[in-house]
Amino acid sequence: MTKTRVIKKYPNRRLYDTDISSYITIEDVRQLIVDGEDFEVRDAKSGEDLTRQVLLQIIAEHEQNGQPMLSTQMLSQIIRLYGDSLQGFMGTYLDRSMQTFMEQQAQFRQQMGGVLGQTPWSMMNQLTERNMELWKDFQENLVAGMGRTAPGAARDKDAKRGK
């Protein structure tokens, strides 16, 4: 089992990596993420978990520099979901979508390395179809959680059964 690396954050905003006994930068933390390292950031004095704040700081800094990944419209829509009844569902949906995207990106890179006769467009179509399946599952689970059948869900199930 891999030990979680602990990074302490001091009031002067300095980050101290306890594994290497050295101060590190926010860019070093970003590199830990890229390298797939498990870590947590803790307040040096209180021990409070500050990992989310540091991750959000990294995202904010990268969104300001270069080509942003998150559009203003998308950020506005995310903000609108806070406090909404769908907030919990959306977090799960985004987690699953990102996980699926990362898995498919790895497959895409592997296949492109070997060029197995599949065009990049067909692989992107498969990615889009998979995300649409996730969205449909999300909607059906949401409606099912409310105790109702999704419009067309019964019809779709009957069609799958051959009725």
Image: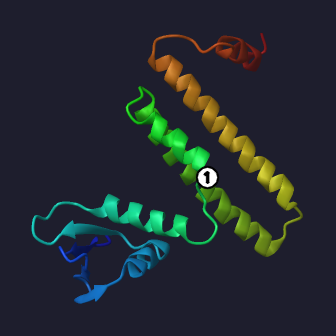
Badge 1 element: loop
Q: On the rendered structure, is 121 left or right of 76?
A: right
Is 160 on the left or on the right of 100, as rendered? Answer: right
**Residue at figure coordinates x 73%, y 45% from the top left:** 128
Viewport quadrant of the C terminus: top right
Residue 26 picture location, percent across and down? 38, 77
Q: What residue is at 52 percent from the left and 10 percent from the top?
A: 148
Q: How is the image coloured?
A: rainbow
Quickly name the residue at label 1. 71
Where in the figure is residue 56, as x and y percent of width and height? 40, 60
Residue 43, image x and y in percent?
Answer: 18, 67
Quick one: 106 or 12, which is closer to the camera?
Answer: 12
Q: Residue at x 52, y 69 (%)?
A: 62
Q: Quadrant of residue 116?
A: bottom right
Outermost residue, left direction? Answer: 45
Residue 77: x and y in percent read: 54, 39
Q: Is residue 151 above or below residue 102?
A: above
- 145, above or below 87, in the image: above
Report the amino acid beneath label 1: Ser
- Where residue 4 sits, quadrant-wise, is bottom left
| 10 Å crowding of disc 1: few (<14), some (14-19), many (20+) | few
Q: Which of 16/150 is in front?
A: 16
With respect to residue 88, does 12 lie above or below? below
Q: Give the position of the N terminus as an image quadrant.
A: bottom left
* Quadrant hosting residue 49: bottom left
Seen in the image, is 158 located left or right of residue 102? right
